[in-house]
Image: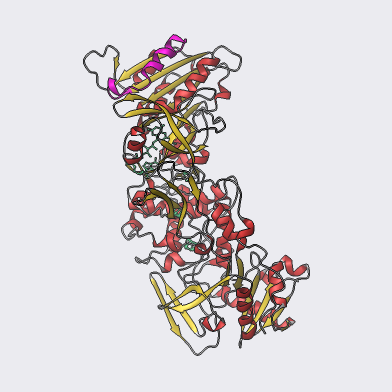
Amino acid sequence: MSGSTSSAPTGGLATSVLSGPGPFTPTVFHVSDRAQEAPDVVTLALKNDGGAPFSFQPGQFNMLTAFGVGEVPISVSSSPGAGPLLHTVREVGPVTRALCQASVGTRVGVRGPFGTDWGLASFAQADAIIVGGGIGLAPLRGAIEQLIETTGLPSGPRRVVVLAGARRPDQLIFKEDLAAWATAGAEVAITVDVAEEGWMGHVGVVTELVPQMTFDPRRVMALVCGPEVMMRFTVQALIERGVLPTSIRLRVSLERNMQCGTGLCGHCQLGPYILCRGGPVVTYPEASRLLHEAEL
Amino acid sequence: MTLGPYGPLGSALVSGVMAAIIGFDGLDGLIGSLKARGYRTMGPVASGGAISIRELKSAADLPRGWEDEQAPGTYRLHQTASPDLFNWAVGAGSLKAEVFPPRSIIWQAKAPGYEVEEISDDVPPVAVVGARPCDLAGLRVLDRALGSPPVTDPAYRRRRDAVVLVAVECSRPASTCFCVSMGTGPSASEGFDLALTELGGGYYLARAGSKIGKELLEGLSQRRARREDFARRTELLARAASHMGRSVDQHGLPEMLVRNLSNPLWDEVAKQCLVCGNCTAVCPTCFCSNFEDRTDLSGTVQRERTWASCADLAYSYVHGGPVRASIKSRYRQWVTHKFSWWWDQFGTSGCVGCGRCITWCPAGIDVTEEIAALRASDNAGETHGEAHLQ
Ligand SMILES: Cc1cc2nc3c(=O)[nH]c(=O)nc-3n(C[C@H](O)[C@H](O)[C@H](O)COP(=O)(O)OP(=O)(O)OC[C@H]3O[C@@H](n4cnc5c(N)ncnc54)[C@H](O)[C@@H]3O)c2cc1C
Ligand code: SF4
Ligand code: SF4
Ligand code: FES
């Protein structure tokens, strides 16, 4: 008395296939230009033949695939607009090594943009302080360019202060950009942990630069990116200058293992956060309450 | 019509979809009819000393007379003379594997152009006979983690939309079960196409919960369900609920855990935890995955997705080392994610009370006991939390 088969399955696999590329499928770009920033850092310009311009906000990241090696999260280091799409990569392991070795013409997979941005809309009439340590300057580069462009406009900041730190002089990235930003009116200060022969600039950690910069603590919007300790000490220095520790005008960018960028793989969790979605940019009060607990 | 404390029969019934009594031949007819409709029909079989979910040929494959005994770190199956087919609680396998395969290829691309070609799985739609209420709840949790906007996992959605679920309510829970305290069992009130209750003597109360469930039921040899059949169901479920071996006090639980992130009790459990990842593998709601690339000799790259576990050291790896290096931090991630942060991320508990992680833990760690110990310490006013996190 087996059942009758009066109708086909209501939902067969064939009938419910979703259209368009899936969330894990990269678009193939190619390297259109490359620049060696430091011995272990390369900036890649990526181009999508015939593809639409890539739209994003500074602070967001892409998942970049070095075909045959793997996929890693890398921040966009250009500013939105007409110029090429840039990513600045430090070689620390297999995937970043392959990316740093990519020559012009090499195919690179791109998925994104993902995550929160620096929220530059809230910078109107602020004193913008941007602090980058090492490769941490990469996700800040687009924001700095956009802030400098809008300085003095009603929607833009009143002033832009850039503090850049590197371990050694030869590891400093964006050297030409730093000079150009100063020429364009930003107050730029650079420091290295360890000097080398010929280095005329400041020696010490980046936080030591905070006291000597010109800004009004009540109008500060600060963006900080670098190792977690560096971010903590930088914010501490700002607080000592009178910036409120509870201010959501202090923003940092956090790093966790990220394998999907879409909130589906789970790896980037930090307490209640799924950082590829709710981060990487978070307010400092949020970050500090989460980073306070070791190994969360 | 409601059934005492076990809720309505499902809104579907109210709108006229039927319930009926079927026998073993009806069950066999159901399996045959699912197969005839093109479903790969899966269900419980007694195999290798455990209840596993396998492809069914007929109702004769169902585990007649088999009963399980479960305890922390222990699972035993034994044969009885009972004619009942469903006298066991969940085995290690859950519905998760049917909608989220442990290993899949997402795309492939060939050198040198690397045009990316998506690989979509062309498996036939799956029907599962014998899904437990906690497993239905587990799917609802996965629906939120993988199957919902802002980004929906397409492979999950495809399999999930196609799956037909024939649930079987629980009349003999294991000592490790705590679905009552999680509000997920032992009755099934939503999320099924058909729900069966094994009334004994080879009879099953079948309730339809969807259009296809109704169609399936209409095609089976059956008799009308009477008042006493429903009364028998109520009685069986009440008995099952009162035989629940364990419980987790839900009151203020997410906040209690966050208050106790630094409680030294985490160090105690870390001394026993082997960080083997069994708990996350058997959990019906753990959804984490790894993505890895493989290249063959012809230069074809394939991106492979596999289940991941927060128990693994590599899970949290960033350049410079793992974020969660200590065993304590990894066990804590699992418990706090399941019972606390899941609420922030997905608006539900990440635990459905199936007890699998207790049974399949080689060290016999019992999450209900660990939570109770934290609760007792918290009640004693020993504050170990981070004021920062409250
Ligand atoms: C939001 C975000 C933005 C970033 N932006 C930049 C940037 O602009 N420039 C830059 O140079 N670096 C950036 N990073 C760091 C960069 O992603 C890691 O350095 C990179 O993943 C290391 O991979 P690897 O294979 O080269 O090295 P290894 O450290 O040896 O990694 C080996 C393997 O571990 C895994 N792994 C290691 N770290 C990560 C990670 N963070 N996420 C996922 N998997 C990981 C990968 O599977 C990798 O293949 C960013 C990280 C995040 C989270
Ligand atoms: S945490 Fe344990 S009891 Fe809860 S759903 Fe997962 S396996 Fe089942
Ligand atoms: S408990 Fe661990 S493996 Fe399971 S979903 Fe959460 S982070 Fe992923
Ligand atoms: S990177 Fe996969 S969930 Fe965030």
> Image height check: is A275 above or below B267?
above
Furthest-bottom residue in view? B81
Of the pair B286 and A125, the residue shown nearer to us: B286
Based on the picture, tell me whether residue A168 belongs to the magenta stretch: yes
| Percent coordinates x, y for residue A13 in the rendering | 60, 60
Magenta stretch bounds? A166-186
For image coordinates 48% across by 81% down, the residue present is B67
Q: Quarter of the image holding residue A291? A: top left
Instruction: State left or right for residue A1 relative to residue A266.
Output: right
> Image height check: is B109 above or below B4?
above
| Percent coordinates x, y for residue A260 in the rendering | 47, 45
| Percent coordinates x, y for residue B45 in the rendering | 49, 78
Instruction: State left or right for residue A239 relative to residue B132.
Output: left
Of the pair B82 and B193, the residue shown nearer to us: B193
Quarter of the image for the N terminus of chain B: give it: bottom right
Based on the picture, tell me whether residue A79 belongs to the magenta stretch: no
Instruction: State left or right for residue B180 relative to residue B67.
Output: right
**Colouring used for the render:** secondary structure
| Percent coordinates x, y for residue A238 in the rendering | 43, 22
> Image height check: is B234 above or below B317?
below
Furthest-right residue in view? B16
* Residue A236 visible in the shown view: no
Q: Give the total number of marks visible in the rendering.
A: 0
Of the pair B173 and A81, the residue shown nearer to us: A81
For image coordinates 71% across by 72% down, the residue present is B214
